[in-house]
């Protein structure tokens, strides 16, 4: 089985904790944009000893994803996996950023083994140096994560076919964003092809997936200014006709609690 929980989701910090193959299996995080102390407290609040963390997979260099990664890795001894572009961007900012941390540079198109799981990175259109998102696979089971992208591509869609669990960005409602007090340049960035996924696009993407197979779908990275849970549910209802029972919402404050995906009953 694979179980996963978010410690927080949104522009103030993202962190997803994943355990594959039971408590003695592989334990990893995708991103940590929360300050280390908060991340440690929230990991413990989920009943997990942070020192058992094997790895942190980084998606890209924006602060809400990488802000706490190096401090947490230094504290826990977790290995940090990131693309060459993310690494270069990080080190342009600070040459010492990863001192004392074990780094592994990854290819954005190449799957690799990490303990009991296979990690499948895939590139996404977003305004960072070399952003990726991930599918975590354990045998036939897989969890897909897709946030921080301005638009869907055929490759993104292919990468996430047949997942058993999915964390999916529902960033904003385009009308709320257009009417917001954000400067025009920021509005254009968010709504642009290298920005963030709007509710309608996310819901449309979901409608094209194998919904019979999906055990859990979590709406993530909701804008606190330009979105609301009601608008997300409305977009899902419009695309799917109804909101599936397996649909959840992640919040900035609490993320979401553990969800488990398991092999289909024979
Ligand atoms: Zn983000
Ligand atoms: Zn980003």
Image (cartoon, rainbow, N blue to C red):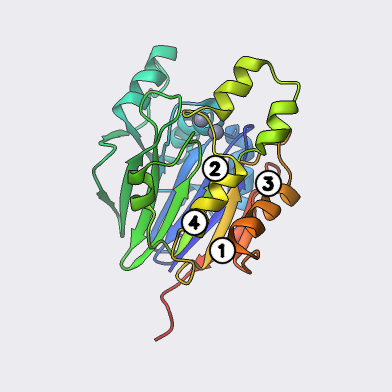
Label 3, label 4: how many angstroms apart (C-alpha)? 16 Å
Of the two numbered discs 2 and 1 on the same chain, state the one appearing first in sequence: 2
Specify whether 29 is left or right of 140: right
Query: Where residue 136 sits in the image (x, y, percent)?
Result: 37, 54
> In the shown orientation, is residue 111 left or right of residue 37?
left
CA neighbours of label 1 inside 10 A, class few (<14), some (14 to 19), many (20+): some
Mark closer to the observer (3, 4): 4
Q: Which residue is mark 1?
A: 259
Residue located 63% across and 23% down the image? 187
Q: Residue 266: image x %, image y %? A: 39, 86
Say which element carries label 3: loop
Point out the tag, 4 or 1, that comes first from the N-terminus: 4
Residue on which the image places disc 4: 166
Which SS class for mark 4?
Answer: strand
Q: Earlier in the sequence, mark 3 or mark 1?
A: 3
Secondary structure of the residue carrying tag 2 is strand
Is there any visible trace of residue 170 in the rendered image? Answer: no
Q: Which residue is denoted by mark 2 in the rendering?
A: 15
Q: CA distance from mark 3 to mark 2?
A: 11 Å
Crowd around label 4: few <14 · some 14–19 · many ≥20 (10 Å) = many
Specify the label residue 186 is tagged with. none
Left/right of residue 119 with respect to residue 2 in the rendered view: left
């Amino acid at each position: 089985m694979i179980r996963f929980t978010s410690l927080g989701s949104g522009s103030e910090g993202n962190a997803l904790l994943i355990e594959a193959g039971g408590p003695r299996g592989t334990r990893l995080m995708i991103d940590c944009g929360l300050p280390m102390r908060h991340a440690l407290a929230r990991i413990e609040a989920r009943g997990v000893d942070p020192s058992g963390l094997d790895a942190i997979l980084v998606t890209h260099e924006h602060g809400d994803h990488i802000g706490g990664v190096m401090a947490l890795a230094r504290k826990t001894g977790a290995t940090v996996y990131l693309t060459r572009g993310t690494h270069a961007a990080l080190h342009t900012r600070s040459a010492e950023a990863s001192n004392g941390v074990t780094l592994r540079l990854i290819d954005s198109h190449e799957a690799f083994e990490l303990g009991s799981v296979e990690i499948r990175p895939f590139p996404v259109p977003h305004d960072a140096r070399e952003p990726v998102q991930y599918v975590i696979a354990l045998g036939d089971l897989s969890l897909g994560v897709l946030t921080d992208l301005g638009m869907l591509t055929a490759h993104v869609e292919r990468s996430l076919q047949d997942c058993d669990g999915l964390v999916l960005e529902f960033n904003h409602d385009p009308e709320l964003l257009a009417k917001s007090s954000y400067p025009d340049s920021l509005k254009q960035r968010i709504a642009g092809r290298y920005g963030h996924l709007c509710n309608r696009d996310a819901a449309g993407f979901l409608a094209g997936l194998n919904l019979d197979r999906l055990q859990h779908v979590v709406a993530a990275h909701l804008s606190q200014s330009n979105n609301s849970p009601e608008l997300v549910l409305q977009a899902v209802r419009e695309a799917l006709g109804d909101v599936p029972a397996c649909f959840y919402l992640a919040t900035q404050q609490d993320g979401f609690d553990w969800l488990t995906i398991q092999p289909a009953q024979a």
